Amino acid sequence: MTVVNETYTVQNAVALYPRINQTYRFDAAEGRSVPCGPTEENAVYDLSFKMSKEQAKNLYKVMVKAYADKKKKDWPEKLPQPFEEDGEGMFIGKAKLKGAYNGQLTTKPMQVDASNQKLSDDFELTTNSIVNIHVGMTPYFAKGNVGHGVSLRLKAVQVIKHEPRAVTSPFGVVEGFTQDSEVSPFTAQGAVEVAEPDSEDIIDAVFDTPVEEPKLKVTKKQATPAEGDAALESIIDQWDDES
């Protein structure tokens, strides 16, 4: 039975490919990680992170101590350096937590904001966000290809800066239309010039020109006096409706 005997917080790391809003498993057919239930095989909460050389050295020291504290007689003496260098002087670490151990569900890693307020249960952390990562140390040794080392069990994440999710196009670059290839009528090249009036008299003339009142066409017919009064009233009503 492995025991987490040390905890450590990596400060101001860069989140990479976080999958901690729920458990995921790798699907070989799809070639990617897919959401799954916490009790499914290989279901994990998973977070890679990028850190400076100094950060990596400090984390490694804590891992060495945790390994030394739990090392059995038949365990190898030295703990290998577990981080991958990215070619730009930064180091990549990885923390994860299984959805369940021996059938017992684990507690989902907590996510909080910079003010230490708990984030919503469905909050999705994004790559390149700046985070503090709280992990537990689990030393292990297994014969064969598994080897030995210290697993970083993800416990909590504090989001210092949240990076907006990038929207990736499924297409490559091809020859053809670009947004700069058409001339807009609103650009300087295609702008329509509007002549300025020579004087205020032109504007005044437009507004001072009397507007001709609409003429009402009335069809005359012979009518009795009573009918005539009714027709006249109808015409007046019609005028009111049109005005």
Image: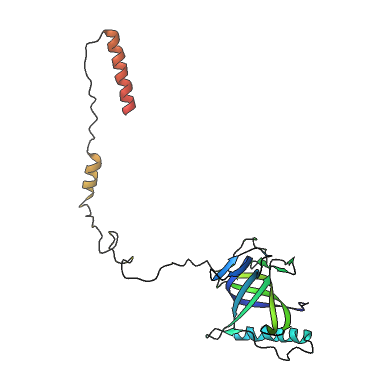
- Residue drawn at x 31%, y 18% as measured from the top left: 234
Image location of residue 225, percent across then percent down: 27, 8
Residue 170, placed above or below residue 238: below
Left or right of 4, for residue 34: left
Given residues 135 and 241, the one toward you in this image is 135
- Residue drawn at x 62%, y 76% as measured from the top left: 12
Left or right of 3, for residue 134: left
Left or right of 86, for residue 111: right
Given residues 135 and 119, the one toward you in this image is 135
Which corner quadrant of the image does residue 16 belong to?
Answer: bottom right
Which corner quadrant of the image does residue 13 belong to?
Answer: bottom right
Residue 174, placed above or below residue 242: below
Which corner quadrant of the image does residue 129 belong to?
Answer: bottom right
Given residues 84 and 144, the one toward you in this image is 144
User: In the rendered view of the protein, which quadrant contains the C terminus?
Assistant: top left
Given residues 123 and 69, the one toward you in this image is 69
Q: How is the image coloured?
A: rainbow
Q: Is residue 17 visible?
A: yes
Image location of residue 134, percent across then percent down: 69, 74
- Residue drawn at x 31%, y 28% as measured from the top left: 242
- Residue drawn at x 73%, y 82% as measured from the top left: 140
Residue 241, placed above or below residue 77: above
